[in-house]
Amino acid sequence: MNILWLSHFVPYPPKGGMLQRSYNLLREAAKENRVFLLAMRQKAIHPMAEDVSEAVSHLGKLCEYVKVIDNPWERHPIFWYYLVFYSIFTKKPYTVNWTTSGRMREKVQHILNNEKIDLIHYDTVGLGEYVFGENGIPRALNHHNIESDLMLRRAEKEGNPIKKLYYLMEGKKLANYERSKCRLFQKNITVAEVDSEVLCRLVPGLDISEIPNGVDIDYFKPQGIPIRKNRLVFAGSLNWYPNVKAVEYLCSEIWPLLKRAVPGAGLLIVGRNPSPEFIKKYNAVDGVEVLADVDDIRPYIEEAEVYVCPIRHSGGTKLKILDALAMEKAIVAHPVACEGIDVRHEKNVLLAETTEKFVEAIVKLLGDAELRVQLGKNGRQLVEEKYAYSFIGKKLNCLYEELLTYVCRQRNEKGVSNISR
């Protein structure tokens, strides 16, 4: 099967959240299909031309074709500021305006005109701008999150009235856009049942399937690095709102109580793209260290006694939880952080919903090595059985085959019906 894969970022290297999901799903799809990748460059991910070249070189070993389009709104900061201001007055949300590019449209059309494409994979709803009428090619839309729900949840939690209004407007625009565009796809793909339920309420009648987030169990596994006593770790993209709010909650509410209970405790916050203000603020907290943009996150996860994840916003599946499970870490997490993952309290994680419960669970784990080991082993077993990308990739490829078969059958039935008339 020839698959045109449209992406709003270059899916390599697979470091963090959406990059991990997209890269691994693309890699699995490419094992059984010829993939034509057309991606937009995000300078936050690939700031230098050399970064793009390295990514294209690697992806070219997987794909039949790789083309990267520069985002026109990132040519200069003034263009981005204009886009933000302009988007306030448009029906389409900022997210969609940001992914709109005449050059991208031309390249999509060029591939469709010159290659026999059997199926098109759209990696986010904003790429709905590149649906070109009824050309008979099956279309699948991947939802990393339900974007409108994510933005509206953010509006609910925002204290600044101006920001709150902006997020509310964007959330409503996104919801309207999702209602209008999601019906154009024969298959909508979510990461978890909770997202499917949200999307189904928003756009009733969609054909929705779950392809869960997964983990590369050959990459994320213990390496025998010594554990640092009373060491905690939080890992994630440090410019993503749910992670930023999680760190804020962790350092302002959980950490002071925990330090009183365990004076020798230390917390490492590690991830991509923190702002200078973020680094300065949290490095100033007693016992807290921020590490930015490390080449390999695994040693920092492995050396910690406890992995803590107090994310309380957003839907989807948190890849950071799957990574930590694969690394055999004892985890304390908010239930929201584990949405979409088949974990059980006291079997493979400890769940906590309040500050006091977080502190209680962390103190318990720091003092019980046997419990930490057991949770870690159970967590590793879970991801091996349900969340290995080799397993998830087979499910994705089956979904593609079923979708292609269904659309071909519908097309044939329609043709017979037209002939009979």
Image (cartoon, helix red, strand yellow):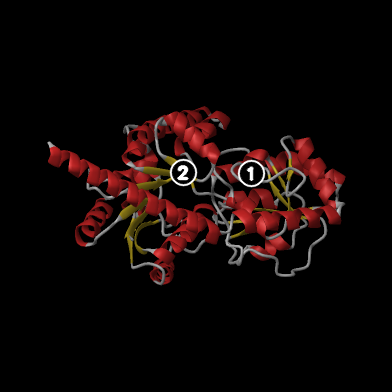
* Residue 326 position in % (x across, y down): 66, 59
The label nearer to you, 2 versus 1, is 2
**Residue that lies at the very extreme toward the front in this rendered image:** 420
Please state, as top left, top right, bottom left or bottom right, where the C terminus lies in the image.
top left
Please state, as top left, top right, bottom left or bottom right, where the N terminus lies in the image.
bottom left
* Residue 133 position in % (x across, y down): 22, 43
* Residue 128 position in % (x across, y down): 33, 44
Q: Secondary structure at mark 2?
A: strand
**Residue 235 shows in the view:** yes
Q: Amino acid at mark 1?
A: Cys
Q: In the shown orientation, is residue 13 left or right of residue 330?
A: left
Q: Nearer the viewer, residue 334 or 83?
A: 334
Residue at left offset 61%, top offset 63%: 217
| Residue at image mark 1 | 338
Q: Could you tell me if the residues under marks 2 and 1 are in contact, i.e. CB atoms within 8 Å? A: no
Q: Can you say whether 387 is above or below 125 in the image?
A: below
**Residue 8 shows in the view:** no
Q: Nearer the viewer, residue 91 or 315?
A: 315
Q: Amino acid at mark 2?
A: Ser
* Quadrant of the image occupied by residue 272: bottom right
Tell me how far mark 2 sits from mark 1, CA to CA.
19 Å
| Residue at image mark 2 | 209
